[in-house]
Amino acid sequence: KGKAKKAGKLATKAVNKAAVLGAGIMGGGIAYQSAYKGTPIIMKDINDQALDLGLSTAAGILGKLADRGRIDAKKMADVLNNITPSLSYDSVKDVDIVVEAVVENPKVKALVLAEVESNVSDETILTSNTSTISIDLLAQSVKRKDKFCGMHFFNPVHKMPLVEVIRGKDTSDETVAAVVAYAAKMGKSPIVVNDCPGFYINRVLFPYFAGFSQLVLEGADFTAVDKIMEKQFGWPMGPAFLLDVVGIDTADHCTGVMSDGFPTRMAKLENDPVSALYNAKRFGQKNGTGFYDYG
Ligand code: NAD
């Protein structure tokens, strides 16, 4: 301890056991990645089917790796054993870190964060995988604000190297250091960013989506935009397909947070096609239909 102090280093809390709240697109991916890199994780949801989906997503990724000869049956079993699905907070009592990855709704997140805080030790770090909601706003619902920050993964978690670690105004240096270390242990490349709606990446991505929506409102065919962005511009996927991958519900909630946060730059669009799909319950790949249909 003395040595670390002399060297001006922080004693970084090690994460040996984690929990993720939500077993959806992101929660399932975070559970897989943590488990794959050797940190056991409790995956908690309120819905049994979501837990099954989270586990089968992990099994699917492992199956592909096994088919390519990149892992053996033991590694596959070890990774799956590292993920404990749960419907109860009892199982998260002794974890070092919690990553909240429930729906992008500040009220739901506030309830979930307050609830989980009352079920873990005073030493447990709490984080949110929110895409856009201010960490200081979410911090209002937790008591130990120094042990709270954003830990924002990208989709698909097992492929995307970046993790934004978002420092709130009360987040301690020790908490930031521990979350950065856990992200690195998960094989990710963390960056530490300041708090504001959308943080770093989504302040770039959501104006792009807004530009796309504007084009569609002006009469552009979304399939043509996708084709041009992919084939001629060379991006891995176009905006409509990417919105389906993100989830139309999540994208619509994020757009709302961004336009509330930046009312001039990200002004709400009337008849936004993303909101129209959301109102039609076309949530993208997750429920089989969005901009495109997934049979
Ligand atoms: P999702 O709809 O796939 O999953 C959300 C999950 O949360 C569902 O399984 C739901 O049952 C569960 N849930 C709801 N209330 C809960 C509660 N009280 N306790 C436990 N679980 C609960 O959504 P997602 O895409 O995984 O997004 C989750 C979070 O990650 C959001 O904040 C989103 O903004 C963020 N995020 C999403 C993406 C993306 O591309 N989808 C990328 C980065 C960050």
Image: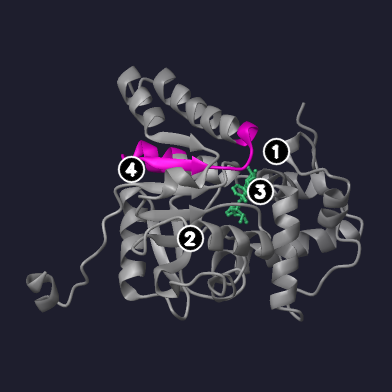
In the image, residue 107 lies at what x, y percent? 68, 64
In the picture, measured across the screen, residue 190 lies left or right of residue 197, that is: left
- Judging depth in this view, the residue of 272 and 165 nearest the camera is 165
CA–CA distance in space, label 1 to label 3: 9 Å
Please tell me which of labels 4 and 1 falls first in the chain.
4
Q: Decide if ligand 1 comes within 8 Å of the CB at mark 1.
A: yes
In the image, residue 65 lies at what x, y percent? 42, 25
| Element type where label 3 sits in the image | helix
Please tell me which of labels 2 and 3 falls first in the chain.
2
Kindly indicate whether the residue at mark 4 contacts the one at mark 2 (C-beta within 8 angstroms): no
Label annotation for residue 286: 1
CA–CA distance in space, label 2 to label 3: 31 Å
- Residue range highlighted in magenta: 32-50
Kindly indicate whether the residue at mark 1 contacts the one at mark 2 (C-beta within 8 angstroms): no
- Depth check, mark 2 against mark 4: the one in front is 2
- Depth check, mark 4 against mark 1: the one in front is 4
Q: Which residue is mark 2?
A: 118
CA–CA distance in space, label 2 to label 4: 23 Å
Q: Amino acid at mark 3?
A: Val
In the picture, measured across the screen, residue 136 lies left or right of residue 274, that is: left
The residue at the point 51 percent across, 69 percent down is: 142
Position of the N terminus by quadrant: bottom left
Q: Which residue is mark 4?
A: 39
